[in-house]
Image (cartoon, grey):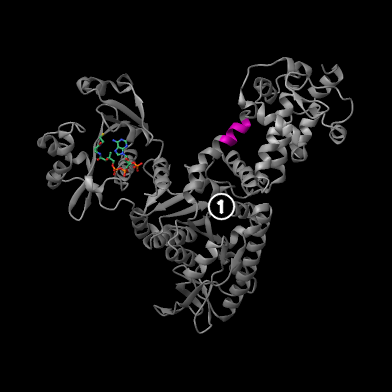
Amino acid sequence: MANSSTASKTATRKPPYLPFITTHSTTLPHAMSLPKERTPPLTFALPPFHSTFTRARRTLSSPAAPSLLVHHRTVRASLNGHASSNGHYTPDEPPPNNGGGAREHRQHGHNHTDEDVDEMFFDGLSYPAEALEWCTTNPPSWNLTSKFNALLDNRNESAASPFSADGVSTRICAGDHNFFAPRVEQAFVDTFRMSSPYINAHQGLVFVIHVPGALLEESLFASVMEDIALMRIVGIKLVLVLGPQMQVNRRLATERMPTKFVDGIRVTDARTLQIVKELAGSMRFEVEATLARGVTNMPSASRISIVSGSFFSAQPVGIIEGEDFGFSGKVRRIDVESINRRLDQGDIVVIPNIGSSPSGQHFNCCSEEVASECAGQLNAEKLIFMGNGETLFDTRSDHTIPNLTLKSAERFLRLRAGGLPPDFRKALKYSVNALNKGVRRAHILNRFLNGVLLMEVFHRDGVGLMVSRDLYEGFRRARLSDVSGLEGIIKPLEEQGILKHRPRTTIERDIEQFVVIERDGMIIACMSLAKLEGDPLWAELGCLAVHRDYRKLGKGDAMLGFTERMAFDMGVRHLIILSTQSFDWFKERGFSEVAVEELPKTRQEKYDKSRKSKIFHKLLEGSRAVDEAEVLKHL
Ligand SMILES: CC(C)(COP(=O)(O)OP(=O)(O)OC[C@H]1O[C@@H](n2cnc3c(N)ncnc32)[C@H](O)[C@@H]1OP(=O)(O)O)[C@@H](O)C(=O)NCCC(=O)NCCS
């Protein structure tokens, strides 16, 4: 048994995992707070998510990543047993009282006091290999979870001494491997797990990020660059397009030169071009240097290099409606081949907004346009703008709009562009442009939110405005003229007993409940969606069928995604489906079985017991949940 002096010493110490956490958070720039002058319009539980990635970055990027596991095991070994002088552990023996300091003990042998445990969190990799052997062959036989929880709550002193003699005698239960998952760590695990499908889904895809000059002067700049480096490390191919507009405006003001924009394009004379070139160059160096710092913080990332240059050619905007735009240019051709070659090598490509014509003349180009054209011509998965925090609201419900379809965005711009803040208007305009060129999604993020890139890219809920291409071409509500086409798909399935029989008159009566996919004038899939009587939050799906020639092409998934979007927009939060043979298909798509008693009363009464259909339910958490399914399935 340890003597009382050891026990009291350990009782007043911090638990070993607390300094571990503190060490990580305090050494990282993410601990920085948001700029004081800007209050972000949205509040999210950002710190846990962001710190999850902060730690994940370290683990993913570290060549010592496997060792970090070992590091944990080392500690676990010492917590569950105590090293004897020959370096072996006996789980049931209490810690020996070695008298001197922990560091001293580690230097002279393998006996480990509880203080060693603290040290090992900082220094575990140098721990003797014998300790590791023990752990891999002997799982923990007891745990102190409740001690740790009590300790987290600062309940009492005795709880704060899990390694004291008292702690050892207070064994709780065998085989609980959650010993190292006290609540705070559990959040990390949950968040990291939640993001893993996204990490997988985004690997090898091209993202183009527009970096505004204003970002360089904000406290989160370094963090954003670190996050970009992390995105590269998890396999995303990145192109950064730089726009030094703010710096140029300021310099022009200093030199008492006029700043003139027409329709979002700067009128550029020779002196202005010179200033733009100078400031674009210094922005490029600044971004490269900060990015490199982010990258070199991560040992394995030394393989990632940053390349920059003029990867596009430009031509003059010219004279429009009598306005001579001088040296303002527009993108002529993106050097897709060169950029792709660099991306394939693992480089991050940085492109300033200066383009040159084949004759050697330089042009000042609108950086948002460059980003948009790059994204379009590179067939990028995403185009991301680091916006000023503008948020779109639905004035009817006062709810933030997290996503717009391409069509809605185009319509919104057509009707409302005049009243929008210029930067937001440009971001939206060039998002639409990119989507029309084949980019799947564009995002306008609030750059004042710490970790906003990670939140948007790796988290289901996202935090910005997303504009997505119409993934549902050919989807529409059914019309009476579709009845024969619908019967053509439904009848064979009714005959097999897969679908419930519906007379033609019923289909005609309920035609508005059907969604169909039309291809070359033919109905190739259908599904019905009907609100339940008496409960507007509930709706029932039915009659999902895909023409046999079009199965296994994702049409079923797309149909479900489309219908879920529709249902959510109609205010539905609970979706149900009754199925006799296809329940697995729905289970794999987030539905879970419920009893008939769990349905609203009116639906319970109509339940046909003779069919013995199973009932499946899905809670519609938000349109972003549907986006998730689309992202992960690459619809
Ligand atoms: C179920 C159905 C709508 C799926 O449409 P789809 O366009 O082929 O679906 P997707 O391409 O999105 O998904 C195909 C996947 O679903 C699987 N799947 C198809 N029918 C399934 C079923 N009854 N149960 C479980 N999985 C099924 C396929 O095997 C395929 O999986 P895989 O990619 O791992 O091979 C289509 O098979 C169909 O029309 N079936 C007959 C009608 C029916 O069962 N409707 C449901 C009544 S409630």
- Position of residue 372 measured from the top left corner of the image (x, y, whole percent): 45, 63
**Is 267 positioned to the left or the right of 470 in the image?**
right
Quadrant in which residue 577 is drawn: top left
The residue labelled by disc 1 is 231
**Is 130 positioned to the left or the right of 426 in the image?**
right
Which of 188 and 547 lies nearest the eye of the viewer?
547
Most extreme residue toward the bottom, as rendered?
359
Most extreme residue toward the right, as rendered?
100
- Position of residue 630 measured from the top left corner of the image (x, y, whole percent): 39, 46
Whether residue 253 is visible here, answered yes or no, is no
- The magenta region covers 184-189
- Ligand 1 visible in quadrant: top left
Which of 302 and 20 lies nearest the eye of the viewer?
302
Please tell me whether residue 31 is drawn above or below residue 184 in the rendered image: below
Q: Secondary structure at mark 1?
A: helix
Please tell me whether residue 130 is drawn above or below residue 328 in the rendered image: above
**Is 408 positioned to the left or the right of 163 in the image?**
left
Q: Amino acid at mark 1?
A: Met
Sort mark 1 into few (<14), some (14-19) or many (20+) by Cα contacts within 10 Å: many
- Position of residue 182 measured from the top left corner of the image (x, y, whole percent): 63, 28
Asked if the stretch drawn in magenta spans residue 470, the answer is no
